[in-house]
Image (cartoon, coloured by chain):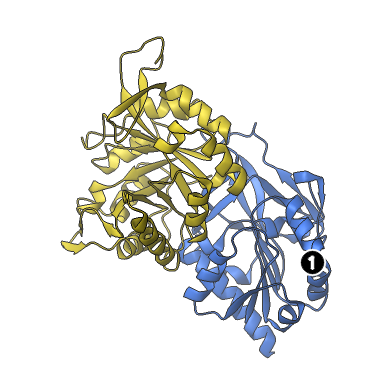
Amino acid sequence: MLAILDYRAGNLTSVKRALDFLQIPCEITSDPEKLHQAEGIIFPGVGAAGSAMENLQKNNMDQVLKKLIQKDKPLLGICLGCQIILEYSPENNTQTLGIIPGQCARFNPDWTDAGGLPINIPHMGWNKVHLEKECLLFKDVDKDAEFYFVHSYYPVPEPEFVIGNTIYGQKFCSLHGREGLWAVQFHPEKSGRPGLKILQNFYNFCQEKNNA
Amino acid sequence: MLSKRVIPCLDVRNGKLTKGIKFKGNVDIGDPVETARIYYEQGADEIVFYDITASHEGRGIMLKVVEKVASQIFIPFSVGGGISSVDDMRAVLLAGAEKISVNSAAVKNPEIISEGADAFGSQCIVVGMDVLRVEKSKKIPSGYEIVIHGGRKPMGIDALWWAKEVERLGAGEICINSIDADGTKDGYELNLTRLIAENVRIPVIASGGAGNPQHMVDAVTKGRASAALIASIVHYGEYTIPEIKKYMHEQGVKVRMIW
């Protein structure tokens, strides 16, 4: 079973719908017991870093999450989840979870696209992820596949944690972490078949780890 | 670099497509959920539902359609038509839509844009505008006027001014529908599209007038749109979405080719 961490950060049902479609057992929960029992955790999130951290701290979820990571529980952070897993976000000047070293930055409106026009913020739409190193999440995913992004801030982890990059005006990190602890800036649940494949790969990893 | 988006638009009334869709092979489908699923599998980058139901019961039916779509297709989709309050927006977003689109309601009550953006984020709020070409005047300096009720009622509002205003109010995207071009199949209104795209910092979707894939290339190059809306050219089987995307790709437009 996968647990989708409920911390009142936006609509979590889109991730659940995608997992239901894939027939992956899952539950939206904030119950520490269930989180510990789950084979893996999905840590989604839309909205602002400040209110997300407040909600996490209010329910002691920040501590629960850190404990789960210490015990090597597989985790997939999505969008805001991919950002607040780092140490700091300039959005609402927020100290974030610090599970992976690094911080976030806001897109610079002076960056220009290939046509020389200034980029729009948020970065919204379909874009590619260029892998810097191999990643189990991308097993059997076409290298030209594109993913759906909606965000104004992006992660800047310590270089050793960068797994994949995306180009929007300039290169930014869109996939970071390490094996079993992944964070993606895009929305796999809204990225068609390649996105679903990533969710399936995550679940397969969790199952294998659990059975090992 | 972002891909240009190809977005089929489906008109729905009382939970059914208003016109039967004939894909190549002449299969007639009246079910919006099934049609959306086929377009999703064919590589649509996003789908727009325009609900023309007027009755209260009809709204409930549409929400059921939205829920079904959300459980079968895994790309963003938006719902427009009849949304006039933050509660209407919330219901549609909770049912699983990624975005909601407002048109006449925003002209009559511009605050709905900022209220929606505050409640759900700008990225959820698409403002649709129906635009008619008119003589340039003091009141309408761009020569493009906002109309509502399907083009029947001119509002005395300059389209360029309105586009900047909705951006200021927090719209995340603008969909420009040219009443002059709509239904002509002669191509999008490129001057209008470009004028607005160059004067706002949010994505612009071109709508109205698509007759062939070259028109879509023009919309995203000469018109500087981020996306092109299509309806009849795919609904009646003249072109398929893969054919359109392949053509755009061959013309050097960056489009999503793996789905």
Look at 55% across and 70% down and name the residue there: A16
| In front of the other: A132 or A150 | A150
* Residue A184 appears in view: yes
B245 lies left or right of B256:
left
Residue A23 in picture, x, y percent from top left:
50, 80
| In front of the other: B212 or B48 | B48
Point out the residue furthest to the top here.
Answer: B138
Residue B229 placement: quadrant: top left
Residue A71 placement: quadrant: bottom right
Look at 65% across and 63% down and name the residue there: A44
Look at 72% across and 84% down and name the residue there: A37
**Chain rendered blue:** A
Disc 1 secondary structure class: loop
Residue A50 in picture, x, y percent from top left:
76, 50
* Residue A141 appears in view: no
Point out the residue furthest to the left here.
Answer: B26
**Chain rendered yellow:** B
* Label 1 Cα crowd, 10 Å radius (few <14 / some 14-19 / many 20+): few
**Which of the image's four quarters has the N terminus of chain A?**
bottom right
**Which of the image's four quarters has the C terminus of chain A?**
bottom right
Q: In this view, does A171 lie above or below A110?
A: below
Amino acid identity at mark 1:
Asn
Q: Which chain carries label 1?
A: A
Report the residue marked by disc 1. A59
Point out the residue furthest to the front here.
Answer: B56
Q: In this view, does B203 lie above or below A24?
A: above
| In front of the other: B214 or B64 | B64
Residue A53 in picture, x, y percent from top left:
77, 57
Q: In this view, does B180 lie above or below B119?
A: above
Residue A162 placement: quadrant: bottom right
Q: Is residue B253 above or below residue B201?
A: below
